[in-house]
Amino acid sequence: MKLRIATYNIHKGVSTIGSRPRVHALKQALSALEADVIFLQEVQGRHDLLALKHAANWPSQSQHEFFAGEGKHCAYGVNAVYDHGHHGNALVSSFPIASSRNQDVSDHAYESRGILHCVVQCNEIEIHCYVVHLGLFAGSRKRQTDALVEAVSSSAPPGAPVIIAGDFNDWHNKLSDTLRTGLGVTEVFDANLSKRGFGTYLRLLAGRGPKIQPARTFPAAMPFLQLDRIYVRGFKVASAKVMHGILWSRLSDHAPIVAELELA
C-alpha cells in the first residue's frame, strides 16, 4: 500500500502581514498536492471578526470542512478559544476517519497546544495519525514531547502503523532522539537510514547514532529553521520534499512537507 501525505502550518488561512484571506488559494494548493492525508496546524475553526471583515472571501464553513469539501473526510481539534472564535489542528483524509480525539498539552496560559489523534481506515488497515503543534519554549516542548510519547504508546497498538506530523518548533533538533527511542519512529528526511545497516539502525534507536537532520521549512520565503516534521513507524519512506516557490511563500509563513510512504 502506498500513501501520499503532507503536513502544513497554514497560519490560520491569512497572510502574515495584514491578515488578508488566503483560504481559497490554500484550498487550491492543498488539492494540487494530491495527498491522501493532510496534517494541518493553525486551522481557523471560527473567526467572527475576519468573517465579517472579509465576507466576500471568507467561507461560511470551518476551514477544515472547507478544505475537505464533499469528497474528503476531516477531523478538528480545538486548541485556542477566544471571544470571536477558535483555532487548532486538523486532519483531512481521502480515507474514512474511524475516530478522533484531541488532547490538550498546553504548558502555560500563554500558549494553547494540542495533539489530535485520528484513526484513519485505509482499506482494512488502521493508521494512527497524530497532528502536533508544540510550544515556543524549550521546556514546554520537552514536556509536550513526553506527553506525545505517552499518548502514542497508550493509544496505538504495538506494531500499528503510525504517522506523527506537524509543527514541532524544534529549531535546535532536540526532540528527535526522544521520539525515536520512545516510539521507534523515523523522520522522513533521514533518507540514508536504510543504507546504514541494521547495526546503525539499532544505534539510532538507542540514541547513539548520528542525529536526524529534518528539512528547513521556515520562513517559507527563505527557509532556514527546521520546524516542521513527519515521523513514521511501520512505513518505508519512498520520498520526501519541501514545497518551495513563490506560491507557497505567499500562502503561509511555513512551507509544507510532502512524503510518499509504503506500508512496510
Image (cartoon, rainbow, N blue to C red):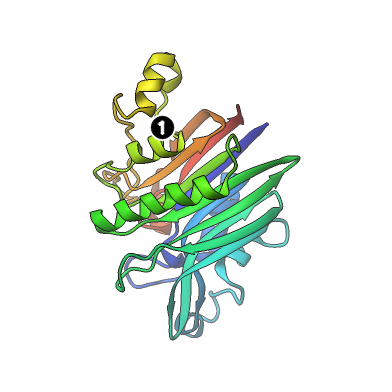
In the image shown, does 99 or 245 lie closer to the viewer? 99
Whether residue 160 can be seen here: yes
Please identify the quadrant where the C terminus is shown.
top right
On the image, the x and y values in percent for residue 135 come to 32, 59
250 lies above or below 157: below
Identify the image quadrant of residue 156. Answer: top right
Q: For the point 33% across and 48% down, which residue is it?
A: 227
Kind of element beneath mark 1: loop
Image check: 141 left or right of 190?
A: left
Identify the image quadrant of residue 17. Answer: bottom left
Whether residue 243 can be seen here: no
The residue at which mark 1 appears reads as: 189
Q: For the point 49% across and 45% down, which residue is it?
A: 164
- Label 1 neighbourhood size at 10 Å, few (<14), some (14-19), many (20+)? many
Q: For the point 37% across and 17% down, which residue is it?
A: 200
221 lies above or below 106: above
Number of labelled discs? 1
Q: For the point 53% across and 82% down, which residue is it?
A: 55
On the image, the x and y values in percent for residue 125 come to 70, 39
84 lies above or below 184: below
On the image, the x and y values in percent for residue 44 come to 49, 70
On the image, the x and y values in percent for residue 49 come to 45, 84
Image check: 103 left or right of 249?
A: right
Three-letter code for the amino acid on which mark 1 is drawn = Phe
Image check: 200 left or right of 240?
A: left
Please identify the quadrant where the N terminus is shown.
top right
In the image shown, does 22 or 173 lie closer to the viewer? 173
